């Protein structure tokens, strides 16, 4: 995680009290293998340090707001029972209580500060791009993605969603594309994001990455996947009538497979045109 310690270490908190619940949630999330599954109620499986911290922070806040909600509910019930007309025929004329007023000011401040510190550390960690092992440029189009690998020469390709009649058994509908992004496991990947028409957003939930791609501007993000597999995402910015049909698929592979893919990619994708010149791209761009 670079120079930033893990958030759980920073606060010294333990998830032991919720171990069984967390284990069940983790199994549910992992069942998607890089994508959401029907009736899933938790985040997708976290495979990067950033997403691990996001998931942890979400869970902690869920416990905090649940405790606050139950506490406020208990106070309301107590007030309704203790101070209704039947239980309290002679109402109190108290108009001021210094201790209560100080408490309801100080306690929320302490809670917000407790949330603020790890929140800012996480934002800093996500937006501070470390020294990258490789860079990938993602370009959003209406409605597909193009990718360039500047570290590997002139490798570039388009990634277009597969239609229902093109899917093979096991491939997810509305998430599968013809060309996957391929990255090596346990390497820091820098994403440079832009667009050539309208604002899109490159987002992969398992990586904890979501970055707007804006025409005429370069944004950047990063991730380091710690587990091999195929992970899916989608454009997360409303970009037109086919917004829901420009998914993202990333293969995280071993070093051996990464070397093999480079050889294949240099033969298949070197100097490949990025404009919609074939029939499939032309139909997508309509």
Image (spheres, grey):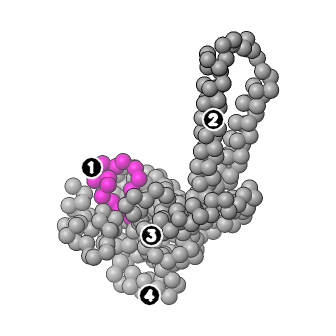
Does dot 4 land on a helix, a strand or a loop?
A: helix
Pointers 2 and 4 in contact (C-beta within 8 Å): no
Q: Single out the mark in the foreground, 2 or 4.
A: 2
Q: Does label 4 or label 1 sit earlier along the sequence?
A: 1
Q: Does label 3 or label 2 sit earlier along the sequence?
A: 3
Residue 87's place in the image compared with 64, above or below, is above
**Residue to which mark 1 is pinned:** 241
Does dot 3 land on a helix, a strand or a loop?
A: loop
Q: Per the image, is 241 magenta?
A: yes
Pointers 1 and 2 in contact (C-beta within 8 Å): no
Q: Residue at x 22, y 67 (%)?
A: 164
Q: Does label 2 or label 4 sit earlier along the sequence?
A: 2
Does dot 2 land on a helix, a strand or a loop?
A: helix
Q: What are the residue bounds of the magenta stretch?
A: 233-248
Q: Marks 4 and 1, how far apart in space?
A: 38 Å
**Residue to which mark 2 is pinned:** 74
Q: Is residue 41 left or right of residue 101?
A: left
Residue 266 x, y percent position in the rendering: 40, 82
Pointers 4 and 1 in contact (C-beta within 8 Å): no
**Residue to which mark 3 is pinned:** 31
Looking at the rendering, in which quadrant would you find the C terminus? bottom left
């Amino acid at each position: 995680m670079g120079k930033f310690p893990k958030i759980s270490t920073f606060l010294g908190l333990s998830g032991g009290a919720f171990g069984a619940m967390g284990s069940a949630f983790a199994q549910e999330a992992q069942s998607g293998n890089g994508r959401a599954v029907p009736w899933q109620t938790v985040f997708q499986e976290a495979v990067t340090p950033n997403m691990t911290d996001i998931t942890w922070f979400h869970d902690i806040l869920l416990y905090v707001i649940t405790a606050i909600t139950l506490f406020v509910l208990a106070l309301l019930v107590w007030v309704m029972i203790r101070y209704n007309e039947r239980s309290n025929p002679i109402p109190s004329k108290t108009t001021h209580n210094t201790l209560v007023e100080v408490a309801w000011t100080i306690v929320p401040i302490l809670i917000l500060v407790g949330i603020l510190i790890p929140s800012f550390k996480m934002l800093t960690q996500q937006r501070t791009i470390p020294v990258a092992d490789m860079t990938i440029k993602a370009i959003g189009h209406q409605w597909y993605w193009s990718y360039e690998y500047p570290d590997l020469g002139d490798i570039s390709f388009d990634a277009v969603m597969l239609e229902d009649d093109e899917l093979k058994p096991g491939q997810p509908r509305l998430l599968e594309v013809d060309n996957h992004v391929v990255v090596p496991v346990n390497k820091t990947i820098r994403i440079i994001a832009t667009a050539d028409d309208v604002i899109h957003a490159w987002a992969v939930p398992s990586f904890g990455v979501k970055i707007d791609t804006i025409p005429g501007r370069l944004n950047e993000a990063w991730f380091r996947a710690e587990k091999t597999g195929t992970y899916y995402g989608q454009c997360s910015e409303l970009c037109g009538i086919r917004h829901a049909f420009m998914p993202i698929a990333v293969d995280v592979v071993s070093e051996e497979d990464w070397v093999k893919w480079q050889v294949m990619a240099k033969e298949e994708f070197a100097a490949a045109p990025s404009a919609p010149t074939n029939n499939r791209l032309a139909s997508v761009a309509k």
